[in-house]
Image (tube, rainbow, N blue to C red):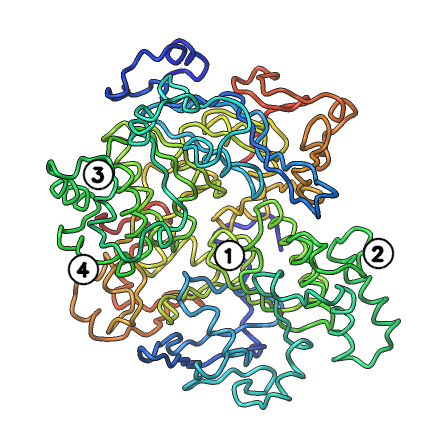
Amino acid sequence: MSASQQDSTEPPVVETDQPLLSVRGLVTEFVTPAGIIHAVNDVSFDVYSGETVGVVGESGSGKSVAVRSVLGLLSQPPGRIVAGEAVFEGHDLLRLDNYALSVIRGSDIAVIFQDPGTSLNPVLTIGSQISEALRIHQDISRTAARRRSVELLQMVGIPNAKARLDEYPHQYSGGMRQRAMIAMAMANRPKLLIADEPTTALDVTTQAQVLDVLKLAKKESEAATILITHDLGLIAEMADRVVVMYAGRVLETGSVFDIFHRPRHPYTIGLLASLPRIDTELDSLHSIRGAPPTTLPTGCAFHPRCDLGKGRARCAEEVPHLNDVGVGHRSACHFHEEIKDEVRAGDINLEHR
Amino acid sequence: MANKNDEDAQTSQPSQGLYDRSPRGSTVLKVEHLVKNFSGPTRLSLHTSPPIQAVSDVSFVAHAGETLGIVGESGCGKTTTARSIVQLIKPTSGRILFRGHDLGKLDRVAKRRVRQEIQYVFQDPSTAFNPRMTVHDVIAEPLRIHGRYKQGGADRVAELLRLVSMEPEHGERYPHEFSGGQRQRIGIVRAIALDAQLLILDEPVSALDTSVQAQVINLLKDLQDRLDLAYVFVAHDLSMIRHICDRVAVMYLGKIVEMGTKTEIFEQPSHPYTQALLSAVPIRDPSLRDSRERILLEGDIPSPSSPPSGCRFRTRCWKAKDICAEEEPVLLDRSGIGHPSACHFATPSSST
């Protein structure tokens, strides 16, 4: 990627060939004693080879549930996939049986979870867990698997990898555990890497170390990546394209430059303006009123908190579809045309409360 | 704002009566050489592990109408420092002076009085309230405890609820009926129900959804402007620190490594740890991502039960020389940049 990226000369988003993963119309619900929770509502997105797609949203926005549904990692019940398809290399993942899915998971698609403290097995050594990942999917000997495990640990920057292979997860620090998870995920050279809040449990300097490893791993393997996070800073740092989720819906999607420099949805604009920045001083933060909904509102999910809709009936009645607002840039707002070009993050033109 | 170096004149004698409000800029809190060691776990009494040095010789002041940020990564001692100020943790040594009064030496009556003026806001508002009390009772509790509810207490609660855009009727509801952001705002107005002059805010927004954090931050700023409150704001989120704080203390492994105004810390950090910390924060602008130089630290934070000799950061520092292992750098302004830094080789850099 070139170092001198200007707004006007952004790298074109390659959308010519077939997507590696294409999710269409995904609907996931949870059946609870208190009623049905609509966690994911008609979510569609594509992931192309080699790119990093950032899925950003607050807690409860459905970002993790959407991706877990696709991977067959949703516990059913209480979860229930109602509709949709997720085509990965010609197979609809939502219709594969467990065996077929398990062949793909861990080899072609690998996952890094948020808390390595709970996703590593505490009673097995790091080495045996990486070897296991290798030997399940590849026909190789124990010694070969061990050799490859050392290489993988070296790749993710674990010092003295050969000796540390025989240590247990509790002997690793949080940052090292997450690196071991990355090593494990990369073991079978996946085509798609899914990182679900990979650095949320880590301190900022450790996060920087892990992100560096993640970037390196991605470069080595040329894997496409889905990065799920609530942290817009991480998205700005890592993603090529962004999917903004709210209350189980996709509200906006576009290149990382579209989302940060030309946002076209009041939620994205409000969110960007509500956060302080490390590199500049802001006089005041824009405050989005209310809180994320617990039950899905009618019409646009964001309308009760929206400053642009201002109570217009259409927002409460009609669910907005994703409209094209630029090349590869879509916004699910009825009134996206009223959002002017000069609206920038931190320079919001929407009426302050 | 008072100059950070000339607070001595104001705090050396307890000149102010406890019932007066501190004028803006005056020193409200002075922490002197605070040390807190936690004794390590004992194994079958045969072997005692060395104590964990959570806070080692930390000193700072906080002024009325001003926010002091304490920032650092997990295990740096920022929360222990905050809790020591309100005496939730008894310091091993050192003094905490609140408006000139040594909190460790107050008698019962004076302690009761002081507790109305120093308040603590916890990170997670859902665990900070009694779930069986209505919001009205939650806010009224401090008034009742201090025998001040009978005279106009209900009006005071209504007034406080209005501050956070709630009607008195909302007081009849229970905490779980409110969202996280609302609960945290209730926690903050409870903290000012009495005559708070100093609020200790321990990660007050990190448990909240991104889109509601600004509501809480804006409320805090508003209250400070109106009431000249002094804040000690403990957080790991450097962007938030930059937004809300006037002065910042950066902690690493139980020590303050650098202290200054927020402009000094964010524009001219001189301690290598501060520089690394700032460079590690992702900037929310994709066009800057390839132009920034990122300092990646080696390894992990050492154990606080056996910190490195000399400078505690030296094991991960790219500038470390022999002197760093031998001599502990004191917090002072070596490079003439106007703010102190605990590094033998402190040089300012423009970080962000």
* Cβ atoms at labels 2 and 1 below 8 Å apart: no
Q: SS class of the residue under badge 3?
A: helix
Q: Which quadrant is the N terminus of chain A positioned in? A: bottom right
Q: Nearer the viewer, residue A166 or A302?
A: A166
Query: Mark 1 is on which residue type?
Result: Ile
Q: Residues within 10 Å of mark 3 (few under 14, many from 20)?
A: many
The answer for which chain carries disc 3 is B
Q: Which residue is mark 1?
A: A235
Task: Determine whether, in the image, residue A203 is placed left or right of residue B70.
Answer: right
Position of residue B97 relative to residue A10, above or below, is: above
Q: Which residue is mark 2?
A: A163
Q: Nearer the viewer, residue B35 or B58?
A: B35
- Examine the image and state in which quarter residue A219 appears: bottom right
The answer for which chain carries disc 1 is A
Query: Mark 4 is on which residue type?
Result: Lys
The residue sitting at 24% across, 74% down in the picture is A298
CA separation in Å, label 1 and label 3: 46 Å
- Examine the image and state in which quarter residue A262 appears: bottom left
Where residue A52 sits: x, y (%)? 57, 64
Mark sitting on residue B143: 3
Q: Nearer the viewer, residue A209 or A49?
A: A209
Give the mark nearest the N terminus, 2 or 1.
2
The answer for which chain carries disc 4 is A
Where residue A304 sits: x, y (%)? 23, 63
Discs 1/3, front:
3
